[in-house]
Image: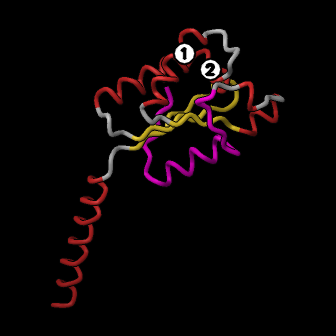
Amino acid sequence: MIKKILTLILSIGLVGFASLTLAAQPPRVVYHINDAEHQALAALRNVRNQLDTDPNTKIVVVAHAKGVDFLMTNYKDAAKVGPLVSALAARGVDFEVCEITMKNRKLEKDQFVMESNFTPSGVVLITKLENEGYAYIKP
């Protein structure tokens, strides 16, 4: 009986320690964009608002399919999104472009703004980040 009580006390202590460890980490969020025309500007504004409210948040924006368009140098709304992308990148936001999308659409890295990073698979990166504890947001 004493062994069971000690095991229970130890288990409760470990859960409490895990909670403290998670609380000590800054918030981490992955934003998923797969349609630039309908999601990009709203997502960028959400990212800006989140950083304005909690500047310690680590944010990764993952774009694939038609979502990569807002990171292209010839994007139709570049005048609107370009300054936001630059400002957010300066604040530590990572912008990741899916290389599978690039291959399927025959796009080259030099067609993207300099703030762009590239990942072999956008969906795989989102999955990895969620498994690492990132919150998932799809505007």
Residues packed near mark 2 inside 10 Å, few (<14), some (14 to 19) or many (20 plus) = many
The correct choice, above or below, for 6 with respect to 89 in the image is: below
Q: Amino acid at mark 2?
A: Phe
Q: Amino acid at mark 1?
A: Val
Sequence-wise first label, 2 or 1? 2
Which residue is disc 1 drawn over? 81
Residue drawn where x is 35% and y is 23% of the image? 49
- Does residue 61 appear to the left or right of 68 in the view shown? left
Q: For marks 2 and 1, give the CA distance.
A: 7 Å
Query: Label 2, on which residue?
Result: 70
Which disc, if any, is residue 133?
none
Q: Secondary structure at mark 1?
A: helix
Q: Is residue 134 one of those drawn in magenta?
A: yes
Q: Is residue 8 left or right of residue 37?
A: left
Q: Are marks 2 and 1 in contact (CB under 8 Å)?
A: yes
**Depth check, front residue: 7 or 87:** 87
Q: Residues within 10 Å of mark 1 (few under 14, many from 20)?
A: some
Element type where label 2 sits in the image: helix
Residue at image x 29%, y 64%?
A: 18
Q: Is residue 62 left or right of residue 64?
A: left
Q: Is residue 121 magenta?
A: yes
At horizontal 29% and vertical 60% (from top left) the residue drawn is: 21
**Span highlighted in magenta in the image:** 114-139
Q: Position of residue 32 (x, y in %)?
A: 55, 33
Residue 65: x %, y % from top left: 70, 29
